[in-house]
Image (cartoon, rainbow, N blue to C red):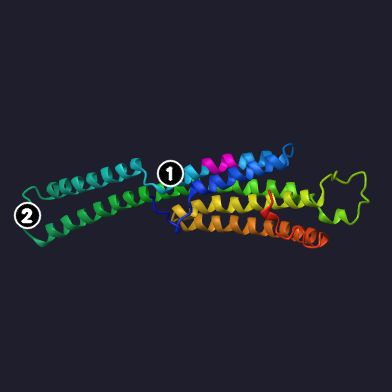
Amino acid sequence: MTAVDYRHLDAARVIQTTEKLHARIQARFPSAGLSHVCADLLGVARTLSEEAARLSRPSRGWRLAIVALSVTGVLTLIAALRLVHPEGLFSNATELVQGLEAAANLLILFGGAVWFLLTLEERAKRRRAFDALHSLRALAHVIDMHQLTKDPTIILNAHGTTASPERTMTRFELTRYLDYCAEMLALIGKIAALFADRMRDGMVIDAVNDIEDLTNGLGRKIWQKISILSALDGGETEAPSRNV
């Protein structure tokens, strides 16, 4: 029996939860645009979970380049010392200083080149992580747009204008719709957290925290609407997440 590691996010479980949410939305609101948004979220979850796993693994190409550069640096250092003094021995302090200076210069040169390659790999992975997180941020705003016109106060006042959006949902349906939006936002935060869980880049972790702050803030607005609906129903929709 395989042991479960509860100290790290399981990407497969995140995808599975997203699949179940999409099935629930499809069953409740088959013709709603929210179902298509959740389908996009499911595709993004699958793609970005694989991307986060790839970014967590060392790049063989970069590692081979670093090893090759290090070996070249050592061989160049040996050749330079032999060029400075072919006999291999320094007869006086002047020759010794010249040899040490040449060695130090080469070490600085190749050490800087190795460091550049190391940071170049980190920057490349960081850029790919930022691109993935940007897509999640955009998707969160799309979800917020879908719930924006779902105003629970319209139940108290049915007098709209010709420019008012069409509202045909019942209190229960509106509660479920808003609950689905809140769940999708929570899943976006968890998909973003896959990158923070698998990478140790401080800038990536800060970007993940920003997305979680964004989704939490948007989610609080939704739950305020659900609380209003719950009050209107006298507690009937107090725990909407238990319903399909």
Residue 3 position, x and y percent, is 39, 53
Looking at the image, which residue is at 48% across and 51% down?
10
Residue 120 position, x and y percent, is 41, 47
Name the amino acid type tagged 1: Arg
Image quadrant in which you'd find residue 212: bottom right
- Name the magenta segment's main secondary structure: helix
Image quadrant in which you'd find residue 131: top right
The residue at which mark 2 appears reads as 89
In this picture, residue 106 sits left or right of residue 82: right
Q: Is residue 96 above or below residue 16?
A: below
Looking at the image, which residue is at 12% across and 48% down?
82
Residue 148 or residue 73, whichever sits in front: 148
Looking at the image, which residue is at 78% across and 51% down?
172
Q: Counting other residues with Cα less than 10 Å from the Cα at mark 1, is it few (<14), some (14-19), or many (20 or more)? A: few
Residue 201 or residue 176, whichever sits in front: 176
Q: Counting other residues with Cα less than 10 Å from the Cα at mark 2, is it few (<14), some (14-19), or many (20 or more)? A: few
The residue at which mark 1 appears reads as 54
Foreground tag (1 vs 2): 1
Query: Which badge, 1 or 2, comes first in the chain's sequence?
Result: 1
Q: Which residues are magenta?
A: 42-47
Name the amino acid type tagged 2: Leu
Residue 102 or residue 241, whichever sits in front: 241
- Find the distance from the CA under tag 1 to the CA under tag 2: 50 Å
Report helix, strand or loop for mark 2.
loop
Q: State how many labels appear.
A: 2
Residue 197 position, x and y percent, is 47, 55
Report helix, strand or loop for mark 1.
helix
Q: Is residue 80 visible?
A: yes
Report if residue 61 lies within the magenta region: no
Q: Is residue 129 visible?
A: no
